[in-house]
Image (cartoon, rainbow, N blue to C red):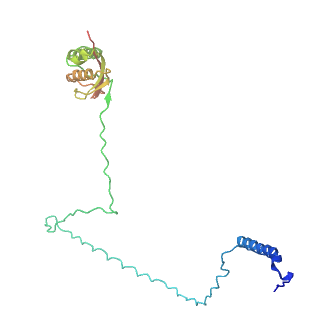
Amino acid sequence: MELKKNPKADLENKRGMFFSIGLAVVLFSVLVAFEWKTYDQVISSLGQLQMEDIEEEIIPITQQEKPPPPPPPPPPPQEILEIVEDDEEIEEEVEIQDAEADMETEIFEQPEEVIEEPEIFTVVEDMPVFPGCEGAGSKQQIDQCTQNELHKFILKNTKFPPMAKDAGIQGTVYVSFVVDAKGKVGKINILRGVSGGKSLDKAAIDAVGKLPNFKPGKQRGKPVQVQYNVPVKFRLN
């Protein structure tokens, strides 16, 4: 039997059209899938807070009562002084107790005693006199005798330190000393020494320290302190 088929009902003729439509649908779906965007959900409303009417509580203002001031202290008892005769014996003894100082205690500062040292002169009306020069003649001759005997004594009692001699140290040491109001020699100081010659300074001080007592100098008839400055020479032969 021969089959009869309507050529319009043959789907083979429309395969190309269906393939194109399917391909277009697939491409459209893929495109939509890539272009599809999602957004985070935003809460558009937080709602409304309903507040009930709260009655305000009125707090009364109170005032703190101050305590009454303490009563004033009683006045101290007054002592009654009894006048007695000079011959009458008093039995009560006054007892003195140590009292600690408080903030209200007044402290009286004791003025410090300023001890004024007597003035030291360099030139006075009557200069000190070296022993043995009292009868040298006039005041000028006595002063000249004192100067000569002073230098002779220092030269005689000055010993050249062996250590300085071996080191070849020499020079002049200037020494000051004071003849006090009693004629004693003291307050011996080095005015200028020799560089590197400490032993020479000590030898000069020792020589001046051996000076005998002078007849003290006087200013307006009163014994005073007088300062002398003398050179002590150390020379190598």
Question: Which residue is depicted at the point 77% across and 75% down?
Answer: 22
| 212 versus 4 height, above or below | above
Residue pushed farthest front? 1
| 93 versus 188 height, above or below | below
Residue 131 is situated, as x and y percent measured from the top left of the image, at 20, 19
Q: Is residue 38 left or right of residue 194?
A: right
Observer able to see residue 21? yes
All told, the count of numbered labels is 0
Residue 75 is situated, as x and y percent measured from the top left of the image, at 31, 75
| 137 versus 82 height, above or below | above
The quadrant in which residue 215 appears is top left
In front of the other: 222 or 110 = 110
Question: Which residue is depicted at the point 27% across and 62% down?
Answer: 100
In front of the other: 212 or 176 = 176
Q: Is residue 60 left or right of residue 143?
A: right
Q: Quadrant of the N terminus?
A: bottom right
Residue 62 is situated, as x and y percent measured from the top left of the image, at 49, 85
Observer able to see residue 161? no
Q: Quadrant of the C terminus?
A: top left
The quadrant in which residue 130 appears is top left
In front of the other: 209 or 31 = 31
Question: Which residue is depicted at the point 82% across and 80% down?
Answer: 10
In front of the other: 39 or 80 = 39
Residue 169 is situated, as x and y percent measured from the top left of the image, at 28, 16
Residue pushed farthest top? 237
